[in-house]
Image (tube, helix red, strand yellow):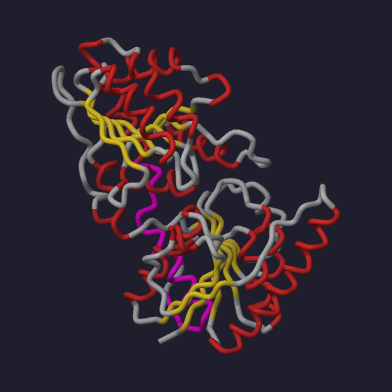
Amino acid sequence: MKKFMLMAGGTGGHLFPAMALAQELARRGHTVELMTDHRVESYGADFPASAVHIVPSATPSLSNPFKFVVGGFKILGGIAVAIGKLRQSKPDCVIGFGGYPTFPPFLAANFLGIPGILHEQNSVMGRANRALGRFADVLAMSFAQTRFADGLNLEKVVTGNPVRDRVRTVSSTPYPALSADSPIRIVIFGGSQGAKALSDIVPAAVALIPETLRHRLHIVQQCRAEDLDRVAEIYRRAKVNVELAAFYTDLPERIARSHLVIGRAGASTIAELTVLGRPAILVPLPGAIDADQKNNALVVDAAGGGWIAEQATLTPQSLATRLTSLLTDPATLTKAADAARSLGQPRAVEKLADVAEMLSGKNVEVDHLS
């Protein structure tokens, strides 16, 4: 039995794949602990770790000298805290999942000579992972073509992005059939951070869909708490069958029952949609420095598994036109569902666990990982 220390930023995009790996390593009889920041209280309450360590960290700010200095001291303090915790825990291997909260503990592990894996969820390497690349032994990638990975001189392996057990449980659910008068199920969500833009645009677009089609809709939408009342009112006026909530613990099951998803293009969203094989209209988060969500969405769009809709040009009218076209063309939706599933990596967590076991000193067959 080995001990693994997982390191992740405290948002769903980083914690969900870490959670999937923790579940797999526990199934194999290993001990798992987690190092992260205070946000774990919102997203990782059910994280399957024998211990959770909160390590101080900061996001570097090059534009503000004062914040840069303060952040630097906080990172140094986090490294010191992590060194103490790692010396006490004595893990055989560490696995970092990105986000600046991984920076102090991963550096601390390197200082102590503990072997380390970096996992990159996006098709564009995050800045924290790029900075940590020189201190890692292996880079595990979700996409074969990952921007900035070629510049790192370390072992690279494509594992895919691990998805949670409850996603894998429903991954074999077939795409639901659509007839001329059957209910049409749409799931709308904006990632772990929510998405005000989807609450602004999607309900207004649905209200513009022809009435005969609109009355067949069964919509599930995840909204920020402050948006629930106004979104509910728009759907009520449009006489649409809708269920709204600030958070759904059973979102994978709801996606598996859906005909179409509308959402952001974060790494975990893409991984879950492709494992479940559901077509999606993807609205990448605008303003990202490296356009990671747009690049994720481009992979799906190019494969025919979904359609990009840029937020800057998306209007209720344009979305209503696209929805009307898609929802009256079951063949196109079914074809896109198949294309999405072809991108899925349902065994990503096993592959990543194999790499972790190998690096920790346990011999495994890993030739299928290349």
- Write the residue at 64% across / 60% down: 100
In this view of the protein, which residue sits in the foreground, 114 or 311?
311
Q: Is residue 343 magenta?
A: yes
Q: Is residue 206 magenta?
A: no
- Position in image of residue 93 (x %, y %): 54, 79
- Using residue 178 as the reference point, say whether residue 138 is left or right of it: right
- Position in image of residue 156 (x %, y %): 59, 61
- Write the residue at 42% across / 48% down: 271
Determine the image quadrant of residue 44: bottom left
- Using residue 107 as the reference point, say whether residue 142 is left or right of it: left
How many circles with numbers are drawn on the protein?
0
Determine the image quadrant of residue 282: top left
- Using residue 207 as the reference point, say whether residue 41 is left or right of it: right
Determine the image quadrant of residue 213: top left
User: On screen, 33 above or below 263?
Assistant: below
Q: Quadrant of the N terminus?
A: bottom left
- Position in image of residue 212 (x %, y %): 20, 12
User: On screen, 58 above or below 321?
Assistant: below
- Write the residue at 47% across / 59% down: 159
In this view of the protein, which residue sits in the foreground, 74 or 236?
236
User: On screen, 339 above or below 182?
Assistant: below
- Write the residue at 59% across / 73% down: 116
- Position in image of residue 326 (x %, y %): 32, 20
In this view of the protein, which residue sits in the foreground, 202 or 227?
227
Instruction: Please provide the residue range marked out in magenta.
Output: 341-364
